[in-house]
Amino acid sequence: MFVRHTETPVTKNPSPDSVPPNSSNGGRLVRKTTVELVLDELRSRILSGSFSPGTPLRQEALADELGVSRIPVREAIRLLSSEGLVDIQPHKGAFVSMLSREEVQEFFDLRQRLEPWLLHQAVPKISDSELARAESLVELMDSSTAEDWGVLNWKLHELLYTAAARPAALSIVRGLHEKSERYFRFQVVNAPIREQAHQEHRQLIELCRHRQADKAQLVLEQHIAEAAEQILTIVDWLIDEVPSSGTTG
């Protein structure tokens, strides 16, 4: 059975439609299906880097580990494929996808255009309490594991952008972070990179506090450019490693 990422473990032979409730909506209990629970678990493992690019996803082994039948595992893998997180190769099986260098470069090109604009819009509106929470996140990042660092990094950036009140743009940026999050764990094992990120994040918070929108925008542009260079170096290294697993980018 698995219990790491869900409040309620999936049990053997659950009902075909639902498992015990784990969320609410308008006062009504909402039940997650077994497929949704398996999907959440596998997605979490991929995004955290627990399943690295090129890792094979064996339905029978996963079903046995998670305590479910192969049917919800198969459906979850299909949905992950539609999200671009899994490659399904005929006669070979399913593998955690490897983003190409071109895809990663495009993600960061989009981030370069959207995030500095979002921050510029947010700076005049962000509250002192939001900035205090941002500082707390930076402190958490200092002592976080490599697996957790990417999640906290997004929470920090999201907090700085939310005051812009541009939900469509924020949703796009969230997706870009999620697609590249699994590479951050390789980046932040490097202590100087962690320290650099710490200093840049604190600088962004101070610029927001002093309502220096133009300067904050420039600092963020450089911050993203440096992150892109670091992540692309990691992707190049991973691409060289993955062929030994029998997959391609």
Image (cartoon, rainbow, N blue to C red):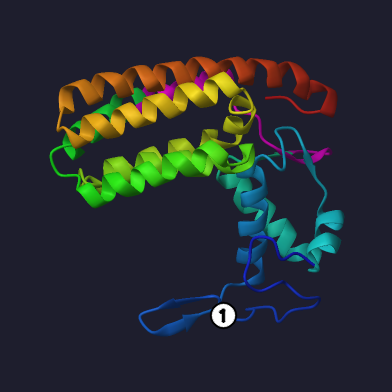
Q: Is residue 151 left or right of residue 79?
A: left
Residue 168, horizontal then vertical, whole percent: 28, 45
Q: Nearer the viewer, residue 226 or 167?
A: 226
Q: Callout 1, which amino acid?
A: Pro
Question: Which quadrant holds residue 164?
Answer: top left
Image point 28% across, 44% down: which residue? 131
Q: Position of residue 132 (x, y in %)?
A: 30, 47
- Residue at (40%, 25%) from the top-left corner? 199
Q: Position of residue 218 (x, y in %)?
A: 25, 19
Nearest the viewer among 57 and 163 is 163
Q: Percent from the top left, x then y, of residue 49?
A: 66, 39
Tag 1 residue: 21
Q: How many marks?
A: 1
- From this view, report whether residue 174 is shown above or below residue 227: below
> Residue shown at 73%/59% (left/top)?
73
**Left or right of 72 in this view: 100:** left
Residue range in magenta is 89-111
Which residue is painted at 38% across and 84% down in the image? 27
Q: What is the residue that sits farthest to the bottom in this orientation? A: 28
The N terminus lies in which quarter of the figure?
Answer: bottom right
Q: Is residue 85 magenta?
A: no
The answer to whether residue 111 is left or right of residue 51 is left
